[in-house]
Amino acid sequence: MNIVDSHLTVNKKIISKRENRFPVIEWSLNITTQQFSYDQHAFRSVFQYSQPIVTVSELMTLLTYEMREKAKQVFRSVLTTGKSQHFTCCLMFSSEEFVYVVFTLNLAKANVVKGTMQPLMKFANHMEIANIFQSLFENEHHGILLTDSESKILVCNSYFEKQMGVKRGELIGKHTRSFNAGRHSEEFYQNMWSKIHNDGHWSGVILNRHPNGEVFPHELTIQKISPVKDKIFYLGLTVDLKQQLSRLMDTELGGIDLLTKQPTKEKFLTELSMFCQKTGHHSGKIVLVVKPKFTEENFHQNLVELSDSLLHVRLAQVTGYLEKGVFAICTEYHFEHNNEQSRAIRSAIRYLFQDIKFHASKAIHEALVKGKIGVSVLGLDSQSPEELLSNSTEAMVEGHAGEGKHLNFYFKSIHDEINRKKQLELFVSDVIKKKLLSVHYQPIVNCKTGELVKFEALCRFPKSPVTKANIEEMITIAEDIDLIADLDHCISTNALKDLNKLHEKYGEQIGLTINCSLNTKQDITEVLAKLAQQILAYVHTPGQITIELTESAYFDSQYKQSNILNDLHKIGVNIAIDDFGTGYSSFSYLTGGLFNILKIDKIFVTDIHQDRNKYNIVKMITGLSHTLGVKVIAEGVENEDELFVLQTLQVDYIQGYLFAKPKALSDLDHPDYFVKKFNQVMQLNNNNNQLERFSSIIKTQIDKLLPNDHLVKTYDYFNQNPKHVLPVIFKKKCLGLVSVSEINLHISPTMGTDAETTQESKKWKKPISQLMNVEFTKLLNTIVVDNLAALIKDNPNFPWVIVDDKEHFVGMIFKTDIFNYLIEENSQ
């Protein structure tokens, strides 16, 4: 049984149940003669139409224009294929009467088509038609709208009005594109309208936008209508699916998941690829694959709520829905140095979830963080957008973090580092809240005299039982979790309490520097006011106190803080800018008179004696600061060379390991230690100056010989440079010296002339190692020259060969160089 026969069988059963209200009318058509014949008795029993139908053309005049074209297509199909067909239409016999019928067609012979005409419904007057139309149009389950050929709304029912949230009067004349949610691509709409134009209809689910911004799914059917020639309308039937979300689970259309309104996996990858192309030098991309822990109750509604929240999360730059309750999110992280990447990655993820928490309900956020999350990082464990998604999905599914963990990194080293950071966060938080911090003190000394001026109070944590970390990392974590103000308060309190003990040991003149980080979410004015109260409570002379403020955190609220800084100045407290030059440096800070001390960061001090740029930077900063009446401290001084350069630049104070590392109060050095240490360093400087003077007369750019060089090569050289002395070098060591004297001992007057003998010609190939003078004066390049005259007396043989502590050749000193140097010294 074919499809048509099946359809007719069903129709006959339906008619049978209606007790055969209308008879089946048989008919036939001769294609050659175009003669149309039918059961006229049965026809008249149904239709009040007395005029006989003789040809198929007369039959067609009873159909609407649109159905005439459809009927012709069906007749052609039967003739071409020989297969049975059917179609439905309305036969219009008068201005009021029309009958809805179904035609069946079968090819009886080569030129004869036979079939039946089955009336299904008869409309006798306008009242009956109007009542049926009213019931169908103003229903409570489908929205209905009719548009013109440009998709402008001509009419709609009240249900559609409620669906769209717009008054019917405002809908009339409105273009349907105004409901476009912006989730479907242009290609999607092009394909949809192409199908409508070609097939006459389209059905599917589409995402529309409510005037309040909400995006919701509609089941939509669009039917193309041509009631008269060259006139087109579109009939739309819509069903609101907001209350039927389960129907949309894992259903996509045009690259959009219809339930969550998020891009599907393929479209997410496309958008991710475009976003990854924008990666900067100090930024990276992170993809998180997230499966929230939603309960079965309201599961679909929760997916929609989370999806809607992600649309407003600024840090979720690319989002998508994969399937089965799994989302993909791409965010970005930024870092200054490569060793800060793990911290930057963790911070980016934390800020992302804080942003989601702000836009989503508490229940949604909890389900998200308690669910399974896989993470992959571009450039570290993934080299392409496809790998980012694949690796983060694998990390989520396999749970790389282990049992009971929710955040899983694909790259083990990243995961281990992030997990270490998390453990450190818990440790740092616990130590600060329980006030288990201790204070160490590092001296700050006068750069010219070495006298102790003050101590800086520095924070120290107890040893972490779970993971290793230095103090800088722990302080950074305290800033990240916004506990830095509590840390500073604890350290400043303990340090101020210790000030009397420092005075007892080092004298009443010794000052104290305490740190105050402004990298906090707390109100800066309140933080500084609280610190001022502490100082007044513990110290009789506030002028002995210096507050170091990190300048990189000061710039964004300068004007608001200026009043409290002025108040601190009024009670005598000194204000220092810490780490100047490493953040948002601005010399304008110095012009307002709010700061009277500037601390140059270690980055500009380290190896300043070898780096001209650092030298010029510190010189400029120091000169300008002194012009404005601001003292300068250089921190991170670790060797004598750095100290000597800073002295020449007239830096006021220095701080660093050259004098002392930070120590607990009980372990601090004796008061006399600092000046003694300073004098030792200065004495070494004097010795170094002597060594430098000695080094200045060493000739290092000297031609050299190898032991296997021949006599002939050396002879040619000394013919042009008879006064020179050449060292013979092997494996960086000097084996001997060669001069004209050594050459002359081994040549005869006839060598090199026509009278040269065979025996003499062989001498030219004699190696220098057999000619050189192996007795010479050898001195170390580190020798301290207290008395150059005594050195000459003890070593009268010139030239001197200068070597380093490994006996490697450095250069030579000649008698003329010594005499010239002595003459220059005496003239000065």
Image (cartoon, rainbow, N blue to C red):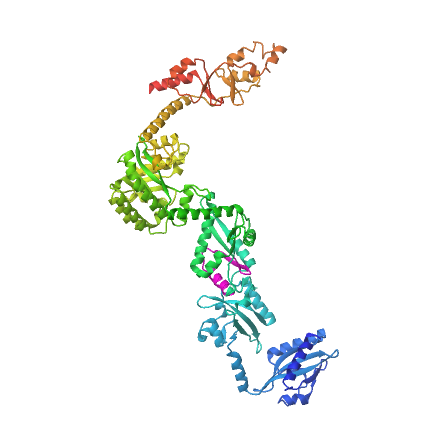
Picture quarter containing residue 40?
bottom right
Question: Does 312 lie within the magenta span?
Answer: yes
Does the rendering let one see residue 767? yes
Q: Position of residue 635 (x, y in %)?
A: 36, 37
**As displayed, is residue 357 above or below residue 665?**
below
Start and end of the magenta stretch? Answer: 300-327
Q: Is residue 358 left or right of residue 387?
A: left
Q: How many marks can you see?
A: 0
Image quadrant holding the C terminus, namely top left
Q: Position of residue 774 (x, y in %)?
A: 51, 14
Q: Position of residue 506 (x, y in %)?
A: 29, 34
Question: Does 679 lie within the magenta span?
Answer: no
Q: Is residue 293 left or right of residue 648?
A: right
**As displayed, is residue 340 above or below residue 239?**
above
Does the rendering let one see residue 516? no
**As displayed, is residue 633 above or below residue 341?**
above
Q: Is residue 397 left or right of residue 352?
A: right
Q: Nearer the viewer, residue 343 or 111?
A: 343
Q: Is residue 362 left or right of residue 772?
A: left
Q: Nearer the viewer, residue 412 or 118?
A: 412
Q: Position of residue 565 (x, y in %)?
A: 28, 46
The residue sitting at the right extreme is 109
**As displayed, is residue 621 above or below residue 161?**
above
Image quadrant holding the N terminus, namely bottom right
